[in-house]
Amino acid sequence: MTYESALAKLRGCGQEHVLRYYEELNDAEKADLLTQIEETDFSVIENFYHPENLSGKGEIAPIEGLDLAAIEEKKAEYIAVGKETIKAGKVGAILLAGGQGTRLGSDHPKGTYNIGVTRELYIFECLVNNLLDVVKECGTVVPLYIMTSDKNHAETVAFFEEHNFFGYDSSFVKFFKQDMAPAVDQSGKVLLEAKGRIALSPNGNGGWFSSLVRAGLLEDVHARGVEWLNVFAVDNVCQRIADPAFVGASVLAKTDCGSKAVSKAEPHEKVGVLCLEEGHPSIVEYYELSEEMAQAREADGTLKYRYGVILNYLFSLDALERILSQKIPVHVVRKKVPYIDENGTLVKPETENGCKFETLVLDMIKLMNSCLPYEVVREYEFAPVKNKTGVDSVESARELLKKNGVEL
Ligand code: UTP
């Protein structure tokens, strides 16, 4: 892209200041910046000025799901069907590892975090070990697709290679990069992270399927005969992946999507819950539930809105392909974004100074015709590593790993 066409593109969206330091750059930096401008989709900034109404929920009702007791009753059948499906090569796994893990405060990909105490045990390793349990049980390798971002791709790939993929068959592992979005300041102007670089950040986990398709991996998915994709977060070190019982229950229910869930501990627990919205599956955030709904109980005393999501979904490939061209809402999220000020000095803000644009996988649920909540035991399957200490932290995850018999 030439300087003139870059300027014209920026003018079109009121962001000419991105070229403010152009004359101070060397040739390589100039070329780099022009490429960045060419590749960046600035239209997303529209959401800063005209945010979508994301809290305007339609009529909400409880959703039918499988609780622990219902699962127990049919467990043998679910496992048998799930194993058959996995053995037939119909299940693939998608590891969402494109996030920046800012709350954990490490500069490295979250999966490379060593959660071990007396030995090295990396977050990626925990997840691979969990998946290997199923691979051993079924005698079939589950294809694993790992989503990274520009920020952590090279380091993530190198880490897996250095550690020999933690014993996973590397011919079944593929990496793909998610898209990036520009970050803006409080007045909607694009931030620069250096004189010749726009502050770009991963655009949320909601674009994982379109990024997989753009990376040309849908052909690989089809070629391997995969019909279900189990999407999971990098930070839940205890979760079971390609879990036969969960797969079997979803297959038998002929659902578009299954969602692992934990029973909400109390009415106001800060977790999104599965529900029906205007008859469609949907996830309602804890602050969007009215007091009456949050407290509502079934005759047996369980909460009506109880299925808290843990970011572990099993999507049918047919459903994903059907919704591929549909729009997922963009969330404008306030975050700390390092930037250079008018004097060209790098500032690392202590408080939120800017906004990022993200789509979320939970918004894909609304596009599904059906979703099956599938309850799992919190103590076995929900140990997210979000923070260094306290709630959902390295400490709390270590406790649960120990409870589950993992040597640390
Ligand atoms: P989080 O919402 O916890 O975000 O991601 P994060 O970026 O990892 O952490 P914070 O908020 O900065 O502390 C939930 C899951 O979605 C993935 C993450 O890697 C994690 O597995 N994710 C998130 C992406 O793959 N891409 C993104 O752009 C954002």
Image: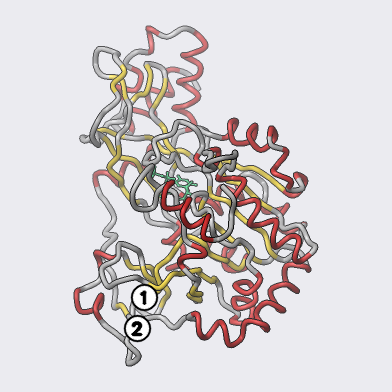
Cα separation, mark 1 vs mark 2, equals 8 Å
For the point 56% across and 58% down, the residue is: 231
Q: Is residue 32 above or below residue 90?
A: above
Q: Amino acid at mark 1?
A: Arg
Q: Amino acid at mark 2?
A: Thr
The residue indicated by pointer 1 is 306
- 180 relative position to 346: left or right: right
The percent coordinates of residue 358 (x first, y second) are 39, 47
Q: Is residue 154 above or below residue 356?
A: above
* Mark 1 and mark 2 residues within 8 Å of each other at the beta carbon: yes
Colour treatment of the image: secondary structure
Disc 2 crowd rating (10 Å Cα; few below 14, some 14-19, many 20+) is few
For the point 25% across and 49% down, the residue is: 50
- Label 1 residue near ligand 1, CB within 8 Å: no
The part of the image, by quadrant, that contains residue 58 is bottom left
The percent coordinates of residue 200 (x first, y second) are 41, 32
Residue 302's label in the rendered image is 2
Q: Nearer the viewer, mark 1 or mark 2?
A: 2
